[in-house]
Amino acid sequence: MIDLKKDAKYALVIPTSMGTRLTPVNGQPFHCSDTFKMQATSAESNVGAVSSYLGLPVKVLTAFVKGSPVSRFIKDNLASRHMDYEGPEFDAGGPWGLRHQINLADSGAGSRGPRVANDRAGEVGRKLAAEHFDLDRIFGEEGAQFIHLSGLIAALSPETSQFCLEVARKAKEHGTCIGFDLNHRASLWEGREEELAKVFHEIASLSDVLVGNEEDFQLCLGIEGPPPGGEGIAGKIDGFKEMIGRVKKEFPNTSVFATTLREVVSVNLHQWGAIVSAGDEWHVMEPREIGVLDRIGGGDGFVGGLLYGILREWPMEKAAQFGWASGALAATLLTDYGQPADEEQVWSIWEGNARVKR
Ligand SMILES: O=C(O)C(=O)C[C@H](O)[C@H](O)COP(=O)(O)O
């Protein structure tokens, strides 16, 4: 099972490419809006927010553009999320050079689903490499209990794929546990299928916690999908269980496998569930109705809550429930990351208690 390192400076270290998201206000579509809210975001740092807001020490490893006001915005945002950060500062390199990703994403409303367009041209995080960090200091002298990687940073560029591999190897060498959310993105895999299959396979084989849906496991790790079976959520649960049986044989060192279940009733009303497998235990959180303000980040919130529970050394069932509720919390916020006021707020969501607290 999961054996957490003692005396580590950080509970969680997160390699990531930080970017921004522009969201039209009031759920309006991007193309007909003139007022946008800007936030700092990335799949991996979204995961870390549950822990950082609840008081665990979290550090982000990322890249910045020297002198860029957007980099400054991101640094200030990370500081406000109670996260430490470090990473190289690259020269912008003229008008066609480096910058941070801009995620153009609306929230959708009612019967109109959200639309997301990732503008990654010149993304500075593509340049991240192991040589930019003193990994022996970070994982040896300082120490980390967990690192969290996702398929976004692992597939962003050949450099970041290598970076993730080296970070994962170094983390393992120093007794740091690894969480990996497969997060397959077709646009990043195009033309790199063979290379990325190898990279993802090695990272997964070093991972203690693996997260992904059926498609992620098939596309990233080449695991055969579930046989065509039952319809709807019950069918998905059976299919996932059956598939994880096969994944476990291929990745015997991984302790925890998890996925989320979602059915979109309308943009603002989802059926939200999750499945966590740990050893011989299965924890199935049957889908329940949740209210949604902005769905982006719900999956990351789930992983964030699950890792928080594991870091607190809770029984896996409790960690899984906290994950479910942290994902539901993130869906009520405009930010991609959950910002729990305290654990009680998250447990109230789990209990279905949305009454006013005064
Ligand atoms: O940068 C990208 O391309 C991303 O996709 C980042 C995503 O906005 C988050 O990872 C949200 O993912 P969910 O929590 O599943 O909604």
Image: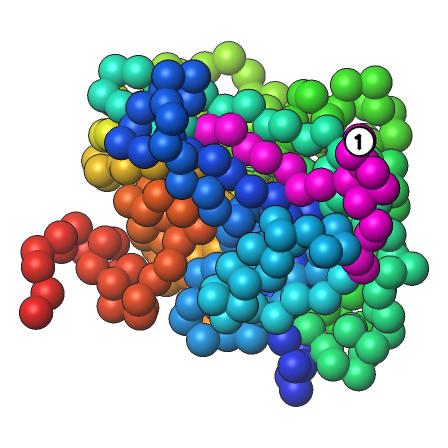
The three-letter code of the residue at mark 1 reads Trp
Q: Position of residue 185 (x, y in %)?
A: 65, 27
Using the image as rendered, state which of residue 76 and residue 303 is in the foreground.
Answer: 76
List the single residue furthest toward the right: 131
- Asked if the residue at label 1 sits under 8 Å from ligand 1, the reply is no
Using the image as rendered, state which of residue 203 and residue 264 is in the foreground.
Answer: 264
Tell me which residue sits at (31%, 24%) in the image. 28
Quadrant location of the C terminus in the rendered image = bottom left
State the scheme by which the image is colored.
rainbow
- Give the residue number, with chain letter if any, for mark 1: 96
What range is drawn magenta here? 88-105
Quadrant location of the N terminus in the rendered image = bottom right
Is residue 96 part of the magenta span, yes or no? Answer: yes
Residue 36 showing in the rendered view = yes
Left or right: 244 with respect to 252?
left
Magenta stretch, overall SS: loop
